[in-house]
Image (spheres, rainbow, N blue to C red):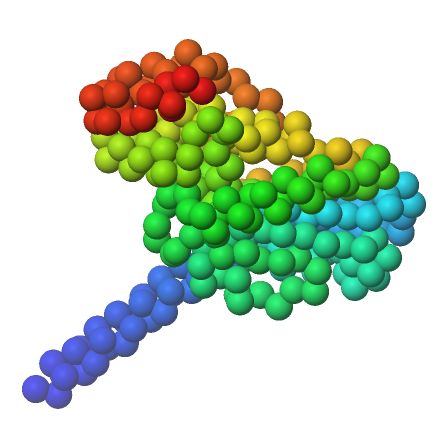
């Protein structure tokens, strides 16, 4: 009996050790992809040079820095960027910013210069009026930037729903209807974002076109296999590789007209 109890105790101890090891491995994986760490690992200041990934920006040629963006990792990315820039740069370059994040994330980080805007309820992956208001603020910020300014854009998964700006001839309700239909019909992320880009003023390079800053740098955390930059968050700061014909083909593939999608959508 004594031997058996000892064996059971040893087995329990081994299970506890395995559980502890598994938790440590999991935590190490989570820590390695923390959004604040990923940004601070790729942004640094050395004297007069700002390193943004592989780009070198001469700070004495920058009047001010404007930060914009959208995504589920937006709060962490904003915190990582502010930490990397440091208080002196935040002050000297008059850093200001606006990042659309899911509701509940706006208080996730104590930020000095960047405003976190709750653009949709957590877990609801579709555009909202709050998201439109935040996107309009972002478009205004980049359009008011000057030739001596630097815009840094922070993008991550969920950015498409968090950065809505309907094209002139359609409504937010139209975009919500399209999103719900295509998602429910089984469209993949590339198909969904192909349509989104052609119904938006900001997606598909729209933010890039609106930007009047002398320099624009984008930091992206990908949630799409293969990391296609014009698909992640629907590519607001890169040229669009899709066409209107391809967007129409997606709508036709999933019988959008038969589902009652507004004719306005097909005319964009």
What residue is drawn where x is 41% and y is 17%?
267
Residue 249, quarter of picture? top left
Asked if one can make out residue 35 in the rendered structure from this viewpoint, the answer is no
Q: Residue furthest right?
A: 60
Observer-nearest of 153 and 177: 177
Observer-nearest of 187 and 37: 187
Residue 164's place in the image compared with 28, above or below, is: above
Position of residue 214 measured from the top left corner of the image (x, y, whole percent):
80, 34
What residue is drawn where x is 77% and y is 36%?
213
Position of the N terminus by quadrant: bottom left
Position of residue 231 measured from the top left corner of the image (x, y, whole percent):
48, 29
Residue 261, quarter of picture? top left
Position of residue 3 measured from the top left corner of the image (x, y, whole percent):
14, 83
Q: Residue furthest left?
A: 1
Position of the C terminus by quadrant: top left
Q: Residue furthest bottom?
A: 2
Asked if one can make out residue 171 in the rendered structure from this viewpoint, the answer is yes
Position of residue 26 measured from the top left corner of the image (x, y, whole percent):
40, 59
What residue is drawn where x is 54% and y is 27%?
204
Observer-nearest of 53 and 97: 97
Q: Please count the marks in the image.
A: 0
Observer-nearest of 176 and 163: 176
Judge left or right: residue 51 versus residue 108: right
Residue 179, quarter of picture? top left
What residue is drawn where x is 80% and y is 51%?
45
């Amino acid at each position: 009996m004594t031997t058996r109890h000892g064996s059971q105790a040893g087995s329990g101890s081994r299970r506890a050790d395995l559980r502890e090891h598994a938790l440590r491995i999991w935590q190490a994986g989570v820590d390695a992809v923390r959004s604040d760490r990923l940004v601070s690992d790729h942004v640094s200041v050395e004297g007069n040079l700002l390193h943004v990934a592989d780009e070198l920006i001469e700070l004495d040629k920058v009047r001010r820095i404007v930060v914009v963006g959208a995504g589920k990792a937006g709060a962490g990315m904003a915190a990582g960027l502010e930490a990397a820039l440091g208080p002196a740069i935040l002050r000297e370059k008059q850093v200001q910013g606006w990042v659309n994040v899911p509701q509940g994330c706006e208080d996730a980080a104590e930020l000095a210069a960047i405003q976190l805007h709750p653009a949709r309820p957590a877990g609801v992956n579709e555009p909202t009026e709050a998201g439109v208001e935040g996107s309009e603020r972002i478009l205004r910020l980049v359009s008011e930037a000057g030739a001596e300014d630097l815009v840094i854009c922070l993008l991550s998964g969920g950015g498409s729903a968090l950065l809505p700006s309907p094209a002139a001839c359609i409504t937010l309700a139209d975009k919500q209807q399209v999103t719900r239909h295509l998602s429910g019909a089984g469209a993949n992320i590339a198909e969904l974002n192909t349509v989104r880009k052609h119904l938006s003023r900001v997606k598909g390079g729209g933010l890039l076109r609106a930007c009047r800053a002398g320099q624009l740098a984008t930091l992206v955390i990908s949630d799409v296999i293969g990391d296609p930059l014009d698909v992640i968050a629907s590519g607001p700061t890169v040229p669009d590789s899709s066409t209107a014909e391809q967007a129409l083909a997606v709508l036709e593939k999933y019988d959008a007209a038969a589902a009652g999608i507004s004719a306005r959508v097909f005319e964009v």
